[in-house]
Image: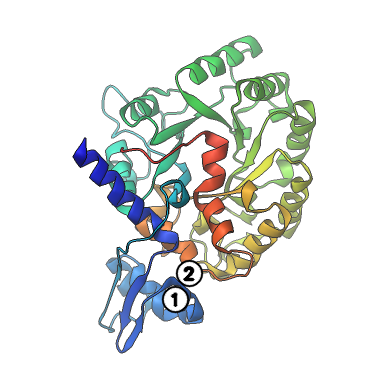
């Protein structure tokens, strides 16, 4: 329809957030482009709070700044780019129900997210942020019950795609059959939660190997959530990579190299595991391995825009290349800045804009397009932006 076409056109313009102009006023300081924004990104302690929720302006994390009278907004400017060129795809987010019938929770979410992580809530935020596609990862709240996420995919075909959760608690035959069934229901990828697999072999168990090989046969990339750190999972990961090299493997959240990974842990409240980081870089020797540059609030020792992660991204770009990296928000936890509320919480649109504050030679426009949507489009089968 004409209305749908107009909405899609408007969203395509908004989706060019990675190249759009910014208008930021701080007293007499006015910055009008992302390039000039990056030129003064060293003043992030003054600039970034402009994009934080107003409630945080009174927190200790930004004390001394709340007396300034400033306003920030994104300027909607026409950009001569095709829809495919402005794809902005969120490769990692969760949605869940409000807990009521017919979609009860298996595990209750944080109190702050009991009603704010529904499909409708996410889609509304995504439209406002210019997102053109998103991969919904089956949440722990519904565990192996995929009915809520399936309803979301059916309600927004093309715009939302799904990563199901492998069920290694079943027999090998049943687990493989369950994966085939979910694939037939439209899921394009599968998540391996290592902590659900039988010990002592974990993901390298009989059921893990069977599921991993079947995922490759079905063309379903496997995402690994090593929440407690990559080192403990590396033997199984390497074994699976050799067992079924045709299967695409995705490492979530840059391998969770910062521990604990609950998010929003500033300065020495958490520790960077450099050994784990080295392991992540070494996995680049396997061409079927991809990395999610996602959940940055879990990986940074600084407040947004998390500029301490720039050297990490630079290494990933040099080692993997932009065509093996994909951005993801980890919504709705990104709105809290962690598993519980922290000073790193951001509105969804701010999470989408965050990399626009980073500056490095390797993150040129071509690389940024790959990171913000191109890689995910190829891996998960997103095509031209569609109306949600």
In the image, what residue occupies the spot 37% across and 69% down? 21
Q: Which residue is mark 2?
A: 357
**Residue at the bottom extreme?**
28
Estimate the spatial distance between the alpha carbons at disc 1 and disc 2, rounded to whole Å: 7 Å
| Left or right side of 7 for 189 | right
Q: Quadrant of residue 159?
A: top left
Q: Residues within 10 Å of mark 1 (few under 14, many from 20)?
A: many
Coordinates of residue 191 in the picture (x, y in percent): 56, 32
Quarter of the N terminus within the rendering = top left
Q: Is residue 46 above or below residue 212?
A: below
Coordinates of residue 271 in the picture (x, y in percent): 64, 62
Quarter of the C terminus within the rendering = top left
Q: Earlier in the sequence, mark 1 or mark 2?
A: 1
In the image, what residue occupies the spot 53% across and 68% down? 358
Q: Is residue 135 above or below residue 262?
A: above
Q: Which residue is mark 1?
A: 37
Q: Residues within 10 Å of mark 2 (few under 14, many from 20)?
A: many
SS of the residue under disc 2: helix
In the image, what residue occupies the spot 53% across and 42% down? 376
Q: Quadrant of residue 344?
A: bottom left
């Amino acid at each position: 329809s004409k209305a749908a076409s107009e909405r899609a056109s408007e969203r395509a313009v908004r989706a060019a957030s990675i190249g759009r102009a910014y208008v930021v006023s701080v007293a007499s300081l006015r910055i009008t482009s992302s390039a000039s924004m990056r030129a003064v990104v060293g003043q992030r302690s003054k600039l970034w709070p402009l994009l934080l929720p107003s409630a945080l302006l009174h927190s200790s994390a930004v004390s001394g700044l709340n007396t300034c009278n400033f306003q920030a907004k994104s300027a909607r400017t026409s950009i001569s780019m095709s829809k495919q060129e402005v794809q902005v795809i969120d490769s990692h987010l969760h949605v869940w129900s409000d807990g009521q019938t017919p979609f009860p929770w298996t595990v209750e979410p944080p109190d702050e997210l009991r009603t704010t992580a529904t499909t409708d809530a996410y889609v509304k935020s995504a439209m406002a942020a210019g997102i053109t596609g998103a991969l919904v990862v089956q949440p722990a709240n519904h565990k192996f019950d995929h009915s809520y996420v399936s309803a979301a995919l059916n309600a927004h075909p093309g715009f939302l795609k799904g990563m199901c959760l492998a069920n290694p608690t079943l027999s090998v035959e049943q687990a493989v059959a369950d994966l085939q069934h979910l694939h037939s229901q439209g899921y394009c990828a599968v998540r391996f939660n290592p902590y659900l697999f039988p010990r002592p072999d974990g993901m390298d168990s009989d059921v893990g190997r069977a599921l991993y090989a079947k995922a490759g046969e079905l063309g379903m990339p496997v995402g690994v959530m090593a929440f407690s750190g990559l080192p403990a999972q590396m033997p199984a990961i390497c074994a699976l990579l050799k067992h079924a090299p045709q299967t695409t493997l995705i490492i979530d959240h840059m391998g969770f190299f910062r521990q604990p990974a609950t998010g929003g842990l500033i300065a020495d409240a958490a520790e960077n595991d450099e050994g784990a980081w080295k392991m992540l870089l070494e996995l680049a020797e396997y061409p079927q391995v991809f990395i999610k540059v996602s959940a940055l609030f879990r990986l940074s020792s600084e407040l947004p825009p998390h500029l301490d992660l720039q050297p990490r991204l630079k290494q990933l770009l040099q080692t993997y290349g932009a065509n093996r990296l994909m951005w993801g928000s980890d919504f709705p936890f990104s709105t809290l800045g962690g598993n519980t509320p922290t000073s790193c919480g951001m509105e969804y649109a701010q999470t989408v804009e965050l990399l626009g504050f980073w500056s490095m030679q390797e993150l040129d426009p071509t690389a940024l397009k790959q990171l913000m949507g191109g890689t995910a489009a190829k891996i998960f089968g997103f095509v031209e932006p569609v109306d949600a």
